[in-house]
Amino acid sequence: MNEREMLLKKISTVSFAMFDLHLYLNTHPNDTEALKLHDKYAKQRQFLVDQFTSKFGPLNTRDITPSTRWQWINSPWPWEYTKEADSNVDL
């Protein structure tokens, strides 16, 4: 797995944890420990997204900066896979 794929996997993992905590907090809004953990993951995700953006370009249009304005159209796009990545997937 190359650096780009590793960063995408980390972003996906942290995003999933954030979403799961978000759902939990919908029914447990007073759980301060869960809120702290959500905030920790949000900061970690932003760090990873910033790292990805600086090396490989924006993940989506929300991550566009003046210096990367049209860089997001360059292939491969975040959802595109290489043959190598496809061959590593067990179905």
Image: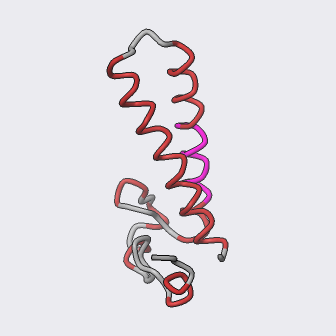
Q: Nearer the viewer, residue 33 or 61?
A: 33
Q: Nearer the viewer, residue 29 or 45?
A: 29
Main SS of the magenta segment? helix
Residue 70 lies, with reference to residue 65, above or below; the image says below
**Measured from the top left, where is residue 48 in percent x and y?**
60, 52
Question: How many numbered tags mark residues here?
Answer: 0
Q: Which residues are magenta?
A: 42-51
**Measured from the top left, where is residue 52 in percent x and y?**
57, 62
Question: Looking at the rendering, in which quadrant would you find the N terminus?
Answer: bottom right
Q: Nearer the viewer, residue 18 or 77?
A: 18
The residue that appears at 34% across and 60% down in the rendered structure is 61
Residue 12 lies, with reference to residue 88, above or below; the image says above
Residue 61 lies, with reference to residue 4, above or below; the image says above
Question: Looking at the rendering, in which quadrant would you find the C terminus?
Answer: bottom left
Q: Which residue is at the far top?
A: 30
**Measured from the top left, where is residue 22 in percent x and y?**
39, 30
The residue that appears at 46% across and 64% down in the rendered structure is 58
Say which quarter of the image contains residue 41. top right
Coloring basis for residues? secondary structure
The residue that appears at 41% across and 59% down in the rendered structure is 64
The residue that appears at 58% across and 71% down in the rendered structure is 5
